[in-house]
Image: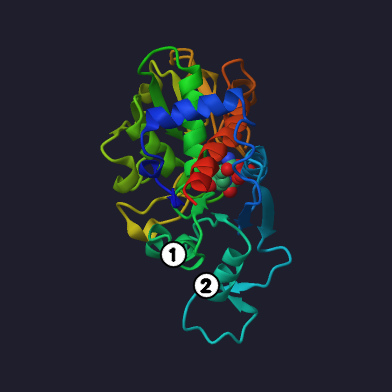
Amino acid sequence: MKVFQHVSDIGDLKLALEEALSIKKDRYQYQGLGKNKTAMLIFFNNSLRTRLSTQKAAMNLGMNVIVLDVNQGAWKLETERGVIMDGDKSEHLLEAIPVMGCYCDLIGVRSFARFENRQDDYEEKILNQFIKYSGKPVFFMESATVHPLQAFADLITIEEYKRSARPKVVLSWAPHPKALPQAVPNSFAEWMNAADVDFVVTHPEGYELDPKFVGDAKVEYDQMKAFEGADFIYAKNWSCPGVTRPEDYGKVLSKDMSWTVDSRHMAVTNNAFFMHCLPVRRNMIVTDDVIESPTSIVIPEAANREISAQVVLKRMLESL
Ligand code: AN0
Ligand code: CP
């Protein structure tokens, strides 16, 4: 695997899940694979889980790890070509990327949507430059439009907790004070569409996800109706994807607190498990009692980030 961006990059999902569960049983079984290999993790944005779980996964494989917070100590980077660099940016991405590539065997990059220009974000302008100029396999650690390590961990979690062959999984928009990217819901939708689940998306009007990711998944605008009989509730805020009105891209269109997942919502489900990628704002996205309830699986879900990262790194190491 040279790029990990879309669900299609992982190949057969059943095989990937089997591999994940086998690694979870013995996460040190491939310790020799990463000997004298270096993973470089580049962060343009904050992280807790991605940073720690990916480092842990690399160490489980016997790799060395280098982590760079671009905004803490590195030179400020220009990303546009053709700019006269007489401002505060000291270095261009076009030099920085191949230099980073010199010091490692695999590169992971986190670079969120900037919300300046929908086309730039949806064309993955930053990550594509890493693919093009680093000379190394690149895995996405949340880009402008996708968060595949999260979606893979979510799928592993659903596989572990499901009580029926084809569970009903509901992705629900929930309110948040600030504009958040669409990467998590985009990838979740893409992966759920590829998995053996009954997938439903619910959100207020105007929050329609890009068809490239949501495909022909069922969209139900009535949140309570969507929740009926659900086996898994996956809550997440996202800002306007700008599908129907491009001028609204990245805007907060609603802060409707009736969409906060609470016990009234959970009561109509099939005793559903509650999921969220974290970090989560309590009593905005979900109430204290729901996230603290016995059916909340947000911690095991986060734990599976180590496993999804390890499958991806293992496959990249195997194809070096
Ligand atoms: C980010 C997001 O919504 O994309 C990261 C989630 C994994 N969340 C925040 O910035 C709060
Ligand atoms: N879920 C997730 O990616 O968390 P971090 O932003 O803390 O890495």
User: In this rendering, is residue 217 above or below 72?
Assistant: above
Q: Quadrant of residue 196?
A: top left
Are circles 2 and 1 on residues that touch, CB within 8 Å? yes
State the residue lying farthest toward the right. 73
Relative image position of residue 127 (x, y in whole percent): 47, 60
The front one of 124 and 273 is 124
Relative image position of residue 149 (x, y in whole percent): 51, 41
Q: CA distance from mark 2 to mark 1?
A: 9 Å
Q: So how many labels did they put on this image?
A: 2
User: In this rendering, is residue 106 above or below 98?
Assistant: above
Residue kind at label 1, given as amino acid type: Lys
Q: For the residue carrying disc 1, how many other residues have a C-alpha within 10 Å: few (<14), some (14-19), or many (20+)?
A: some
Q: Is residue 176 left or right of residue 203?
A: right
Q: Is any part of residue 223 visible from this angle? A: no
Q: Is residue 276 left or right of residue 186?
A: right
Q: Quadrant of residue 242?
A: bottom left
Residue kind at label 2, given as amino acid type: Thr
- Which residue shows up at 63% across the image and 33% down it? 282
Identify the residue position indicated by label 2 in the image: 79
Identify the residue position indicated by label 1 in the image: 125
Q: Which mark is residue 136?
A: none
- Which numbered disc, 2 or 1, marks the residue that appears first in the sequence? 2
The front one of 23 and 243 is 23
Q: Quadrant of residue 205?
A: top left
